[in-house]
Image: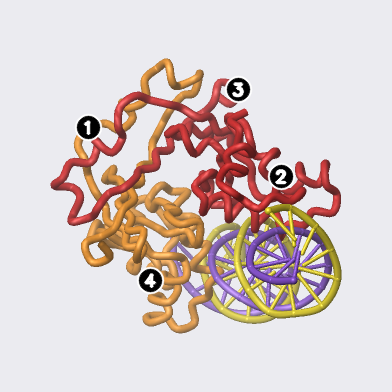
Chain colours: A red, B orange, C purple, D yellow
Amino acid sequence: MSDLLERLRVRGWRMTSQRRVVAEVLDGDHVHLTADEVHARAVERLPEISRATVYNALGELVSLGEVLEVTTDGRAKRYDPNAHHPHQHLVCSGCGLIRDVHPGGDPLAGLPAEERFGFTVSGVEVTYRGLCASCA
Amino acid sequence: MSDLLERLRVRGWRMTSQRRVVAEVLDGDHVHLTADEVHARAVERLPEISRATVYNALGELVSLGEVLEVTTDGRAKRYDPNAHHPHQHLVCSGCGLIRDVHPGGDPLAGLPAEERFGFTVSGVEVTYRGLCASCA
DNA sequence: TTAGTTGCAAAGGCTTTGCACGCGC
DNA sequence: GCGCGTGCAAAGCCTTTGCAACTAA
């Protein structure tokens, strides 16, 4: 739990039952659901909620910077609510499991000035690939 | 030029005019085309080539490990023929420009053993985000 | 009240598939 | 000649959009 709902309320995000359910489904650690999975879980609590509404809510959460969009496999995007704790992903090539990892140090430091080619670098995404204990 | 065709021939890849054109279009440095862009360029040389054939060829090149699939924006996948020279990507958030970068050091070293959670880590993808000189 | 949100259904972008024909080896 | 590759068209998956009805603030 990371009080996603609380933060949204503080920021004045218009709250509806649909949006509350989406935020609740998404809240937590090591959560990396696809839009469809979010919808499936939301439907359990609010049977009439539509996919379009889920997509709307997810899009806004991403714009607000409260949720991160991650694409680990070229298929559906996944949504990661852990936007306020910089982290990286460890992805199992076998089963698709995604694990958050928090190595020390600033990953941006890995790119020296002479390799920046005039870019103003503002962020970096790191995805480690491998096999998890079960798949190995 | 990195002799993609030569490598494919050596590996016994069945060669057809379509597959040759796809490989030719893809060969080079700083190439990050979408499947559709590959198709468009292929059509210039071989007007009848179909999208399905381009997708087939791209899929095989990826399986062979001769081409890398990169998804920098959640939209269409891009294909990077530079699979034999480890590198990372610098992506402009403004115009989408992708630049290959080659920082020194082994990026895998960034993940200490205690952060591997039983995974056998085999690779890592690093994408730096920022604005290029023109967009800044 | 009223601007913003929802649900539906349809459209859209990207990719894959099924099958008959054709071509590299 | 055999078996894989090709082209076409249709289907598939994921996501977005248009619009009338609805609702939080």
Q: Residues within 10 Å of mark 4 (few under 14, many from 20)?
A: many
* Quarter assignment of residue A109: top left
**B51, above or below A15, in the image:** below
Q: Which residue is at 69% across, 38% downward?
A: A24
For disc 1, the marked residue is: B105
**B89, above or below D7, in the image:** above
* Chain hosting mark 3: A
**A27, above or below B83, in the image:** above
**Which label belongs to residue A134?**
3
- Residues D1 and A76: in front is A76
Which is in the foreground here, disc 4 or disc 1? 1
Q: Amino acid at mark 4?
A: Val
- What distance separates the C-alpha of mark 2 from that of mark 4? 52 Å
The reply to the same-chain question for discs 4 and 3 is no
Which is in the foreground here, disc 2 or disc 1? 2
Name the spot of residue B41 as percent of width and height, x first: 38, 76
* Chain hosting mark 2: A
- Residues B112 and A85: in front is A85
User: Cβ–Cβ below 8 Å for labels 4 and 1?
Assistant: no
For disc 2, the marked residue is: A20
Instruction: Provide the secondary structure element on which disc 3 rests.
Output: loop
Q: Amino acid at mark 2?
A: Arg
Question: Is B4 left, or right, of B35 in this rendering?
Answer: left
Taking the view exactly as shown, the residue that stands out farthest to the left is A114
Q: Amino acid at mark 1?
A: Gly
Which is in the foreground here, disc 1 or disc 3? 1
Q: Which residue is at 83% across, 47% downward?
A: A46
